[in-house]
Image: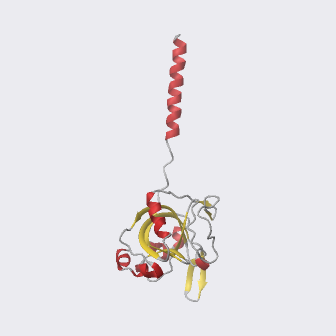
Amino acid sequence: MRPFIGVLIAVAFWLAADGHAEVVRESPPTAEKASTCALLMDPAAYNHKLIEVRGVVSHGFEDFTLSAPRCGGRSGIWLEYGGRVNSETTYCCGVKTGTLRDAPLVVEGIPTRLIEDALFRRFDARVRTQGNVSFGARLVGRFFAGLKQKTPKGEVWGGYGHFGCCSLLVIQQILTVDASAGQGASGQGRNDRSVKNKW
């Protein structure tokens, strides 16, 4: 009888240890904090990195970008959702149709994901507002510098977004959405002082 009880105790410990092993999960990778201006001034330094950044999100026809007014008029960073959710932004030379992709977005061989929580739904509701919108947000995403291109105005980085205008930030998580930022049709939100002063 004693050997049988010993076997039961051993099995119980094994099951408990095995069950505990399933609960332990890999901690998510830590995002490097960077300003929007830093990403625009030196895209190569952040290429393929997971970035935490805050700035002004603009969305409308041929526009889904992250920028900051203090960056001296540099082109914005093109935005797209990671994972399977498609922002459905209308622009030249990009995939526009269908709310869901067939598979998670992969860029330059790197798979992306998206945390679809309440903050994301709030962010996405603003993005999908008719007309042009502009609001502040803090995001975590995978950054892709693109390619360096020589133009009459100097060297620029791009290859993503409308006519390859920009570097790319694939949004993986929304950390904050600014409730006070302006939004409106026909670009009115882009001139909102609360956005410019805050960001």
133 relative to 1, above or below: below
Residue in the image at 63% along x and 65% along y: 108
Q: Name the quadrant of the C terminus.
A: bottom left
Q: Nearer the viewer, residue 115 or 46?
A: 115
- Can residue 97 be seen at all in this image of the molecule? yes
Residue 135, horizontal then vertical, whole percent: 42, 72
Residue 118, horizontal then vertical, whole percent: 44, 58
133 relative to 85, above or below: below
Outermost residue to the bottom:
152
Q: In this view, does 3 lie to the left or right of 137?
A: right
- Residue 91's image quarter? bottom right
Residue 23, horizontal then vertical, whole percent: 49, 40
The tally of labels here is 0
Outermost residue to the top:
1
Residue 194, horizontal then vertical, whole percent: 35, 76
157 relative to 114, above or below: below
Residue in the image at 52% along x and 37% along y: 21
Q: How is the image coloured?
A: secondary structure
Q: Which of 146 and 84 is in front in this view?
A: 84
- Can residue 51 be seen at all in this image of the molecule? no
Residue in the image at 50% along x and 30% along y: 16
- Residue 72's image quarter? bottom left
